[in-house]
Amino acid sequence: MFETLRAKAIQPLIRARDPDEDIRIWVPGCSSGEEAYSIAMLFAEAMREAGQPLAVQIFATDIDEQMLQIAREGSYPAAALGDIPAAMRERYTMPHAERFTITAQIRDMIRFSNHSLVKDPPFSRIDLVSCRNLLIYFDDRLQQSVLPLLHYALRPGGYLFLGPSESVGRFDHLFPAIDGHARLFERSPGSPSYPIDLPGARGRSPRRRGERGEREDGPTLGDEATAMRRIVDRYAPPSMIVDQDGGILAAFGKLSRYFNFPVTRAGGSSAMTLARTGLREVMGPMLRQARDARKRIAARDVSVTTEYGVQPIEVICDPLTDGSLLFLFRDSAPFSPVEQSDLADLEPGDDHIEALEDELRLTRHRLRSTVEELETANEELKSSNEEMMSMNEELQSTNEELSTVNDELKTKVDQLTVANADLRNFFESTDLAVVVLDSDLRVRSYTEAARSIFPLQPSDRGRLLADVSTRLANTDYLDGAASVAAGGAAMQQRVTTRGGERTLSLRILPYRTQGDGIDGATLVLTDITDALSMERALAAERERLDLAIKAGGIGVWEYRADTGESILDEICRELFGFKAEDDAHSRLLFDRIAAEDRPTVELALAEAIAARGDFETTFRVNADGQERWIKGFGRVITEAPPHRMVGVSIDVTAEYAVAENRELMLREMNHRVKNLFAIISGIVSAASRSHDDVREMAEDVRERIATLGRAHSLASPAGEQQSIELRALVEATIAPYKGQSSITIDGPRLLVDRRCLSPLALILHEWATNSVKYGALATAHGVLSVTWLLEDGQLRLEWTETGGETADTDSAKGFGTLLVQTSSRQLGATLERDATDGRYRLRLLLPDTVLSHD
């Protein structure tokens, strides 16, 4: 702290000192003088290093005469030497056994005097006021009175040095901070513009006799209160009022000799905690006895011990009617200072010289005190004279009506100060570029951010905005500002910088006075370059999202459970079979859902809304006579009322058809594998009956299996198929069984369309497989006839078996029958069966669309 004071206050004062003037320092509340001597050492060391004469006057004041006497002696315990830098300790102190004293060079710089900061007139033309750890004992009202006094005492550009727990509060405009951490402030330039209630000036203002008919005969109540306060402070013994727990309620007189720091009338501390050694031990028992017995308690021969000596006193505790207690302190014997144990006795015979030296020392001491008091009195007299002159000048221009509005004016000044501070902080901290113009479009004020667009300087206030250069691409804002300042409506527009790299939103608002009049315009510029880039990116993303939704056939919907209202987009309406003009209420939506799936959908929707969770289900919809599979996803939105569910619907009919076909194909594959093994088993059995040679039988079986493979290749749904002749398809199907029975194939040359090849091959294969198992191909005397004929736009294919078992046409319910029926539906064909007179016939009527006309 003191290093900051030396670098930022003491050295500048020394450099700026007028050779004909002294540097004046005031240390109010100096107590025992340590702070004053420390500042004196800093000035002496700085002026020694600068090679200047020691032209410094330090006024150290306090209200406790006993503490001032200790300060004048300049003798302190040796333990305090550790707080002084080594260089200054050797140069400005004289150590003894257990104490040390300050050198005469430093002591002569300081004038110690009795002075009250709140009662006596302040000093004037001061360069530095060091008021450390004094304001913390003042309440807010007293601080508001003292700080203007310190501003009055300081010269313009002077310095105020406070303690680490103190601040200037709302007077920061009077004392701008130089170093906030070190609590070092500078007095602002200019004359004071605040009302100063100078101490010592109360009651001095002359009043004209008979003015306003007031009578001047007889003392007033204020005079009596002043007299009583003067008696209590100066002539009555020090006293204190405490509550029943020892908390200080009020204090009177000079109590600092009995307590560890000056006790103020505001109180707020514990008396037992602050009492010095000796007094602390008796106050607690006296408080308890007087509180319990409600009688006065006295303690005699109480020795209050300080680091400077012992003071014998008497203490009286007197209970008051409101429950509080009054403590009175009276000195019962003179103050006994600490003995100087390191003083040696003089040799015998020097007693006369010793007496003369003591008398001379005492005389010099008294002379120094007298000179200091005289100089202090002169300073007070000068200050009082200046104060009277100032008051006389003020009284000439002030009338008594100001006193009636003084309190209101102070309140308004406080409010204005706070408002100005808020406005200043806003202008300094906001990122908005704001320029305030008057009615002539002259710059009234601006924020720091506005300088990035208009290179304004403090000297530009009052300058026409048109004369200020700008980084904007055009000056259309001037026309807008003129229109708004003339009473037009507020406007908003986009502007760009000259290079076009930045885009700003310009709002021009009217500047309204307190009477709602218009006295100018306010320009507010906001950089929206990033926001526009984000907006374009969001628009592009939205466009891509819409494109993806349309390409994917995804329908978007919104459902409100409280009203049952549903909102569907165009795709979603198509999925549910609604037209653009149809009402899509939720009840109508549920009617479109298949009856089997409707309870599941309603339950899932209710659970999602109740749990504020997600909705997901798959259901069937009957739309335009077609059945669709729909998969729905939804989520409850609760950020803002009304609560609603937003979701999407996807047509998964194709996926379900693929799954159904896949299941059918798997079952068909299993069936065909079983049939294949049955066919192979029949081929092997037939071959075994007709062959005696194993090698010949194996070759015959191999040929039949290869032929069966070729038929399966023709019927396979995989790979790229070509149109083939119907005869080739029939022959490939029956080829594995030739030689087992009599087979006849007859019909015109027709080409089967490749899209119908697989279903038709599966039907023929199934018929052949059944014939091998049960029909004509199962016996050597069986007869199979396959014929076809194209007539009247229909292809009639007949499969006739003779000599085999006669099948029951009503009981065929196996997988082969299901496969034939499914394939028939795919071909749009009609299947007929009949079995009469040992003959089994299958007739398949197909449309000519199964034929290829290439």
Image: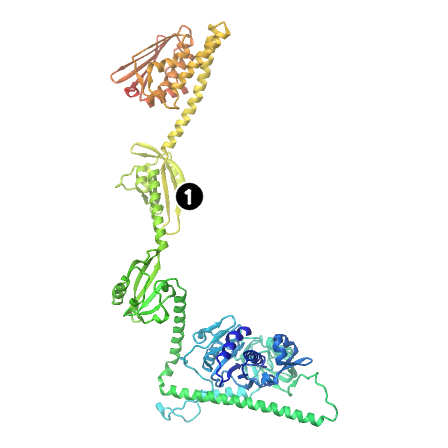
Counting from the top left corner in percent of width and height, residue 475 is at 28, 62
Farthest-out residue, right: 348
What residue is shown at x 47% (from left), y 72% (from top)? 177
Q: Nearer the viewer, residue 83 or 673?
A: 83
Circle 1 sits on which residue? 614
| Horizontal arrangement in the rendering, residue 242 relative to residue 199 (left or right) | right
Quarter assignment of residue 490: bottom left
Residue 95 visible, this orientation = yes
* Quadrant of the rendering where the C terminus is positioned: top left
Counting from the top left corner in percent of width and height, residue 744 is at 35, 8
What colouring style does the render use?
rainbow
Quarter assignment of residue 846: top left
Q: Amino acid at mark 1?
A: Asp
Quarter assignment of residue 708: top left
Q: How many marks?
A: 1
Q: Nearer the viewer, residue 535 or 194?
A: 535
Counting from the top left corner in percent of width and height, residue 750 is at 30, 15
Residue 560 visible, this orientation = no
